[in-house]
Image (cartoon, helix red, strand yellow):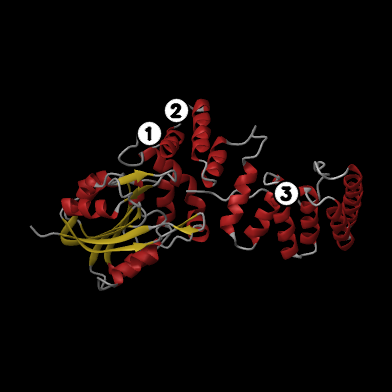
Amino acid sequence: MLLNMVSPPTTMPVGHGLPGPIECAERISEASLHNDRGNALFAAGDTAAAVAAFLTAISLHGSDANLWNNLGAACSRRNDTAAAEAAWRRAIACDPQFAPALQNLSALLMADGRTEESSLLSCSAFVLPPLAGKSPQQLAIAYYRLGRIREAADCYRAWLRAEPDNAYARYLLTACTGENVPAKSPAGFIKTLFDGMAEDFDIKLVGKLGYRGPQVIAALLENHLTADGTLDVLDGGCGTGLCAPVLLPYARRLTGIDLSPGMLAKAAQRAGYAKLVEAELGAYLHSRHHDFDLIVMADTLIYFGDMTDVFAGVRRALRPGGLFAFTVETLVEPAYTRIDYQLQPSSRYGHSRRYIASALNNAGFAVQSCDAVATRQEFGQPEAGLVVLARVLSH
């Protein structure tokens, strides 16, 4: 998943711009003098006079991104955020690679809740030279956010040159290149990813990515089940236990399973789970036989590509007539080909609706409902998915 990387804003005006090819040296020199005066006034706290000085400089040399950035800084100091935003946008229009304005505008937008554009601007600034000393992983994330997947892959290759045995980096490279894609995400990748996010997982997933998997599952179950507390329920890939409050009204006994000990430690702090199991999901399911009436997997199967084994495991673990509720992310299938599933640069798998229905049928399920839904956002946009309810077929 993408972390928001916002560099600290440039709160002080910066230096002089380079001469524009069509502007005379005298005007540029005069603009530089007014810019210097504006810097001095800004440092002295006279922001009104600083704004006037920067505006005069801009009237003489309006293509200089530095001057517009300085004006934005002075306006921001005066809490005139609209003028600051306009000035920083003009700076970026003059020079799309002017890092101080990119960082300043990113910070302003983040404070205003406009996280999508904010992250785009901060990543644009982050990938600018010099790159020495910057983390290959963070550079890869930034390139991914910018849609520059090949450059993200190059960063993972650089990471692997430094750490040849890093399975986490190798899998992320696979997600970017689409080469040697496994049937599911490796257990080591899952543990590393989620143990690393466990401490502030709920804040990031719900607060920043707009995650609403529990609400989606709640609406699905309300339409098909009575909350009478009589079912043995498995929360598959339970994470920190966000679905526990949704599942408890239906549960006689609620079991949670996850591969990440860090996540399970957080889930243990929630009331409701009778048992928490640290295990690989597929192996655990195949070790159960008619143990559950309801199995729920909210945003768990996005780390599985081929569903054959996991669906068979769910079928084995459910009792006759048992229900299976889950969410997946979806692919838009091109008209010229039929794609079952695909590992995406996000490191999550997307599946076609057709494949999900076929795999469930082959595993011995009847689909009760299959509806389009978005359980999270990706770069501020809803991520297309499905919420599915299937019932074990009677033999």
Question: Is disc 3 placed on a helix, strand or loop?
Answer: helix
Callout 1 amino acid = Glu
Q: Which residue lies furthest to the left in this view?
A: 395
Quadrant position of residue 112: bottom right
Label 1 sits on residue = 179
Q: Nearer the N terminus, badge 1 or badge 2?
A: 2
Callout 2 amino acid = Asp
Distance between mark 1 and mark 3 Cα atoms:
40 Å
Callout 3 amino acid = Cys
Question: Is disc 2 placed on a helix, strand or loop?
Answer: loop
Picture residue at 19% right of the left edge, 48% below the top: 312
Label 3 sits on residue = 94
Image location (x, y in percent) of residue 211: 45, 60
Image location (x, y in percent) of residue 131: 64, 34
Q: How many labels does the image show?
A: 3
Label 2 sits on residue = 165
**Which of labels 1 and 2 is toward the front?**
1
Give the camera-side residue of 180 and 264: 180
Question: Is disc 1 placed on a helix, strand or loop?
Answer: loop
**Which of labels 3 and 2 is toward the front?**
3
Task: Categorize mark 3 by other alpha carbons within 10 Å: few (<14), some (14-19), many (20+).
Answer: some
Task: Categorize mark 2 by other alpha carbons within 10 Å: few (<14), some (14-19), many (20+).
Answer: few
Residues at circles 1 and 3 in contact by the CB criterion of under 8 Å: no
